[in-house]
Image (cartoon, grey):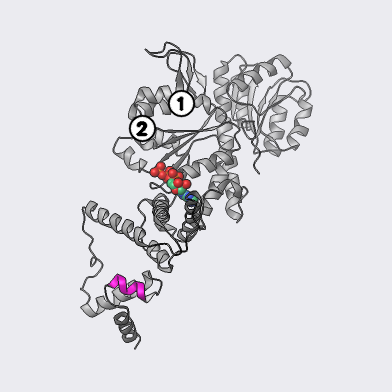
Amino acid sequence: MIQPVTLHPSFQVLLVDDEPAWLRSLSLTLERAGISNIASCQDSRKVLPLLEKGQVGLILLDLTMPGYSGEELLEIISERYPDIMVIIISGMNELDTAVRCIKKGAVDYFVKTDMQEHITKGVLRAISSHEMKLVAKGMGQRLLSNKLEHPEAFDEIITCSNSMFSLFKYMESVAISSQPVLVTGESGVGKELVARAIHTLSERRGKRISLNVAGLDTTSFSDTLFGHHRGAFTGAHSTRPGLIEQARGGSLFLDEIGDLDLQSQVKLLRLLQEGEYFPLGSDRPKNAQTRIIAATHQDLQKKVQEGRFRKDLYYRLCIHNVHIPPLRERKGDIPLLLDKFLQNAATEMGKKKPTVPPELLTHLKNYSFPGNIRELQGMVYDAVSTHKSHVLSMQSFLQAMHADAELHTEDSTEPPEPFAQFEDLPSIAECTVMLIKEAMKRADDNQTLASRMLGISQPALSKRLKQLKD
Ligand SMILES: Nc1ncnc2c1ncn2[C@@H]1O[C@H](COP(=O)(O)OP(=O)(O)OP(=O)(O)O)[C@@H](O)[C@H]1O
């Protein structure tokens, strides 16, 4: 069972300084920016034993301290703990010292008199960078293992496909990152379920809030996401927090992100880049402490090329990308999904789970499911709703598949070219053999079904098969 944690980031940020007042003030500044996994240490001699515990990922280190100096500690840490990042925050504004510290392995150097906002941004940058390193490290380890660490997070996603299993491992690896995740895939493949699993895996204590951004104009988008202050516009009678506030410490799922208008894209980009936003009617920025998960069935790269989606936003969003394959590329999932949906539909409608005719699975496996899992689910619910007793009728399935095939033939602007691969046309006899073989393959060697596909009787097919053998 995953226990929700309150702390961000997933590793500890250790503040080392001999001045308690500075430690307190720095700690408060970082907490305001949503960094809560903080430990402080006033005695430089206690730093190394603290690092032994293996929880620290980032150190903010003073230079002038009794015991070990910051530079001495920096050298030891770089050598013994190369994975831990060190930022120097010194009272001295000396270029030589800064250059020396960077050469010794510090990732940044700040002076205590620098603006707090400046220091905070540097710390947030280092946190993101360390998170990415942890993600990459975790990914390497997970790819070698054939087990999931949190299989329960994927309970709702029925699958036996290897490609989905690899995606689950990827999702486990990126779960700790606070960077956005872009979930892509055709309509009905399960993007929302995946977004839910990512939120569960992230172990964030805050809520998962969803928003479908399709059709929202810029004002509604800003108001819904950022909220408003009383009097911000006519009708704003009271202050209302936006969804980012509601998802504080959790995740914000933005569905249909490909439909976001260009002006709203600028606002979302700013939020992702700066980590802050302005509620309507306010000139005081607020820190966004939520992780963005976006989803789309559209080809965002194509939209970028067409100038309909901002390139910078696209790259920000797809730091982690989960692409879900369509159902036709994981047909092995069809029997499991069919069984699950039959059970669910029967339970919901107070019926006994129907028996399935044996040919149904073959028909379903030969169908391309443009509407993916949602389409299969719809077919099953429709069939169960009209089902009376015993064996489930195939009629509604066949009708749905036929109707869809017709729709797609009408849609298609380019007629298929079945002979494009042949330089010399095959003979009629060769075509017959090819057709029979293909029909038997599609029908899983079921002659009754194959003969139906070919439009001949089963005895006629059987005769031809015999001739082929001879
Ligand atoms: N692997 C799965 N196991 C069980 N149910 C699934 C699976 N994938 C999808 N579903 C079900 O199919 C339906 C569609 O899934 P979902 O809404 O997540 O798709 P989507 O990709 O977000 O679609 P859209 O692009 O149209 O928003 C839902 O009812 C969902 O519960």
Image height check: is 256 above or below 140?
A: above
Determine the secondary structure under disc 1: helix
**The C terminus - image quarter:** bottom left
Q: Which dot marks residue 271?
A: 1
Q: Nearer the viewer, residue 98 or 431?
A: 431
Figure quadrant of residue 51: top right
Residue 413 is situated, as x and y percent measured from the top left of the image, at 21, 52
Q: Nearer the viewer, residue 393 or 204?
A: 393
Image height check: is 312 above or below 231?
A: below
Q: Nearer the viewer, residue 303 or 134?
A: 303
Residue contact at pointers 1 and 2, CB within 8 angstroms: no
Q: Which dot marks residue 76?
A: none
Q: Is residue 311 visible?
A: yes
Residue 281 is situated, as x and y percent measured from the top left of the image, at 43, 13
Residue 380 is situated, as x and y percent measured from the top left of the image, at 42, 55
- Left or right: where 291 falls relative to 397: right
Asked if residue 451 lies in the magenta stretch, the reply is: yes
Count neighbours of disc 1 (C-alpha within 10 A) and say few if under 14, some if 14 to 19, many if 20 or more.
some
Q: Is residue 323 visible?
A: no
Q: CA distance from mark 1 to mark 2?
A: 15 Å
**The N terminus - image quarter:** top right
Asked if residue 317 lies in the magenta stretch, the reply is: no
The residue under label 1 is which amino acid type?
Answer: Leu
Determine the secondary structure under disc 2: loop
Q: Is mark 2 within 8 Å of ligand 1?
A: no
Q: Nearer the viewer, mark 1 or mark 2?
A: 2
To which residue does mark 2 refer?
A: 260
The residue under label 2 is which amino acid type?
Answer: Leu
Find the magenta span and give its range.
Answer: 448-454
Q: Nearer the viewer, residue 115 or 417?
A: 417
Residue at the limit of the structure toward the bottom, as seen here = 470
